Image (cartoon, helix red, strand yellow):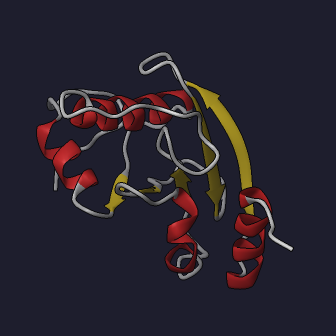
Amino acid sequence: MPIDFETAQQELFEEVGLDVQSQFIDLETPRVRTHVFEAGPPGDDVPLVFVHGGMLFGAFFAPLMAQFDDTRMIAFDRPGYGLSDKFVYTKRNIRQNASDVIGGVLDELDIEQTDLVGHSGVATRVSNSHSPTPSGFDDSS
């Protein structure tokens, strides 16, 4: 009997020993409901933020995240993937959307600085193309 995505995701978290707190954030730009989950100790330390590339979802990083049990970590499903709302990507909006979503999630979580871990070049493209002063991004590295 097939299982739904949410159940499969929870089984993955359990399999790798990752205790997550899950929530949904309603972003303004783009106007979508985004699934976000956190793991590790809460606090004011600079978190690791995991950003998946196309055709994946945030839980893709669960096995890697399980290796950092003493670090605050955040991952999310980009719009159109995982448990986040559907979204139509176009050649015109793909980079801006990634930047807006990452910035929006970080703003909603009140995070001013982060270490970004990305897959498929998405995090690198976004962090390199972002202006030096947006909330949530640190250009010091």
- Foreground of the two, 25 or 48: 25
In terms of image quadrants, where is residue 92?
top left
Residue 70 at x, y percent in the picture: 59, 73
Task: Give the vertical position of 9 relative to 31 (above or below).
Answer: below
At a point 32% along the width and 64% down the height, the residue shown is 119
* Relative side of 30 to 21, left or right: left
Report the front residue among 19 and 97: 97
User: Dividing the picture into quarters, in which one does residue 18 lie?
Assistant: bottom right
Report x, y in % for residue 100.
Answer: 35, 28
Residue 139 in view of the camera = no
* Camera-side residue of 20 and 47: 20
In this view, the residue farthest toward the right is 1
Residue 103 placed where, x, y %? 38, 32
The residue drawn where x is 12% and y is 38% is: 129
Q: How many marks?
A: 0
Where is residue 15 shown, x and y percent of the image?
Answer: 73, 83
